[in-house]
Image: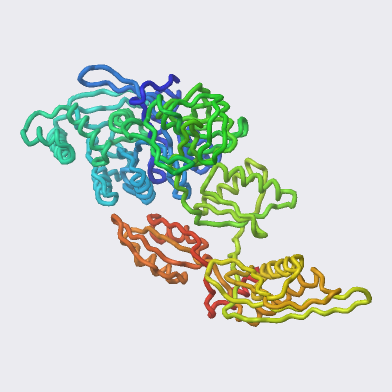
Amino acid sequence: MTEPGAIEQIRNLGIMAHIDAGKTTTTERILYYSGVSRRMGEVHDGSSVMDWMQQEQERGISITAASTSFHWKVKDEESGNATEHHCNLIDTPGHIDFTVEVERSLRVLDGAVAIFCAVSGVEPQSETVWRQADRHGIPRIAFVNKCDRPGADPNHVIEQIRTRLNANPIVLQLPHKLEAEFNGIVDLVHFRSRFWDKSSLGQTFEDTEVPEDLREEALLARNIMLEAIAEVDDSVMEKYLAESEISPGDIVSALRRATLAMRAVPVIMGAALKNVGVQNLLDAIVTYLPSPTDVGPAKGHHPANQASESRQPSDEEPLAALAFKIMNDPKVGLVTYLRVYSGVLRSTSNLLNATKNKNEKVGRLVRMHASYREEIKELRAGDIGAAVGLRVTTTGDTICDAAAPIVLEHIRIPAPVATVALEPETEADHEILRAALEAIAAEDPSLTVDTKTFQTLLRGMGELHLEIVVDRLAREFGVKARAGRPRVEYRESVQQPIEHRYLLKRSTAGAGQFADLTLRLEPVASGAAVEFTNACPSDLPKSLLTAIEAGVHEASQLGVIAAFPMMNLKVSLLAVEMHPVDSTETAFKIAALRCFHEAVAKATPVLLEPLMEVEVVVPDEHVGDVVGDLHARRGKIAGIEGRHGVQVIACLVPLSKMFGYSTDLRSRTHGRATYSMQLNKYSEVPAGIRDEVVARVRGA
């Protein structure tokens, strides 16, 4: 593949949509018609180039964001000259469990193609990814796919784009018939028909005049298009009001300006599986979506003084690149995907990881085509590629010229919402499991591994997400792990302050043990760990004080209700009596441990449960059902805020009631609601259910 030309001819775009809207099929056609692939891969038979993971091929869904590059020439209708554009494309997953793949892709892309099924319309994940693109300020074009399917209704889809996504769709094409007879479109910009040749797999097409039976409808649709463009562009508005001729060039220029300003979304039609309309999509990508120069400078801050910094999209600027994805390749090791915002990145370069303030050296540079690597010598400003050999760089890090350091805006990683406990089948697999999980977590920043408890807790974005990870452990790393329901990590505390004395006095044939001490326990603000202070008026040897503190902290790890760690507690040493011979460090450590436990038992101990701060984004029509379900889970609603056709419910819910919520919420709202949660605080388990919780915990 030839290298990209001028930065103005680069397009960095993503393909995004709900699952099964046709993203990967469309991408496969793009690769075929642009000459990257010699055959069309199909999702249904596992031959897709972009769905290269075994789990993707088996399930027929995209799990990871796959990157590729291609070139496409667009001919200028007036001059007849063709300009070649270099396009970096990322095919993103459609399942909500893999939303981080969309998030980190959109962070580095300049534009996007939103694909909608002509039958299903705007589906739940369509709304989610659209909101993500809104947050990143990414211009979009819409491709209404599957116009050949029974029940196809592009007009209904366009209305949903307008009402459910609060966008301004401007229709550029009309379909020639629909469903099984769909084989072409009417181009409203150039006012002509285009029909695709099925025998050539859609490789060739013919442009003709608009048929008489469609001419009246097409003229009306073109007038509606011109009115819509006039509303978002002053130059077209002037000509429209003056009833002057508006040329195709005028339309294209105005629509490009409106698209870049996010005042309009061009809409085109097609059926990727039937090889109809994909060339028009390619033309629209390079015509209407932005180049890096249209996006403007990349913004960040200086790592030392936090002062604002920016980099213009130019080869002449100092290097600044963002790592947005890590892939563990068994043949070459870690492959780091990079977006270069300024400067030129060359192989074997010595650079600075400004995020971690550590030096890095690039080994090789490659251009990725899904899992295939094409070696290159450099990546210039505006381009996307990957580096092999980076040691410390992880997702979201900035690498740059050490002489001009900058930290670019980090990638937003959504908080995990599902947890599963893992246990290797054999003791020998413990260390292998730990290493395997570290490798997978390095690739996937939405995955966290917690080994602080007796269980290995794996946290991710949903049940399917975690299921895929467990499957990868077995296939890629040879680790068979049992996945079960994790137990809630409760805590314990006390309700009232208390002073308690404990006397340890033992006599043996040899040396005895003597320790006499008084502790004061008192509850403190929520979220505090056990704090130990010395309030004893008499001087103590440092070794004995250390032993007492060690005894208190050891005792605080096992509460008296259900043996959970203590928290929200201050422990003060008030008095000590010593024996000149028998007062040893061991004696005082034992005395402190027993004094603590006896004091806790008398200070009205309480069981605390993790209370999660939950935010549910739900369409208006499902709010009542979702709120009722949250109440049934002992949730306390903190507020409900309306946002563009959805309601955002903020509430506090015990973690014990959130297991399985992801699946239940999708079922309750037909998959249209999303949620996130994070730990808010530990709160006392209500007295009415405490005995039930304790019995369940002790029986687990």
Query: Does residue 173 sit above or below 580 in this rendering?
Result: above
- What residue occupies the far right of the structure in this picture? 509
Choose between 638 and 397: the one closer to the eye.
Answer: 397
Give the x, y percent position of residue 359.
57, 34
In this rendering, position of residue 304 left or right of residue 436? left
Query: Does residue 126 sit above or below 619 in this rendering?
Result: above
In this rendering, position of residue 538 left or right of residue 320? right
Specify whether residue 604 is in view: yes
Choose between 340 and 158: the one closer to the eye.
Answer: 340
Name the residue: 32% across, 48% down.
122
Name the residue: 52% across, 56% down.
418
Give the x, y percent position of residue 466.
55, 51
Give the x, y percent position of residue 605.
61, 78
Choose between 49 and 150: the one closer to the eye.
Answer: 49
Query: Looking at the image, what colour scheme do you see?
Result: rainbow
Which quarter of the image is occupied by the C terminus? bottom right
Specify whether residue 213 is in view: no
Name the residue: 59% across, 52% down.
449
Give the x, y percent position of residue 407.
46, 39
For residue 687, what is the image quadrant? bottom right
Choose between 551 and 337: the one closer to the eye.
Answer: 551
In this rendering, position of residue 379 left or right of residue 211? right
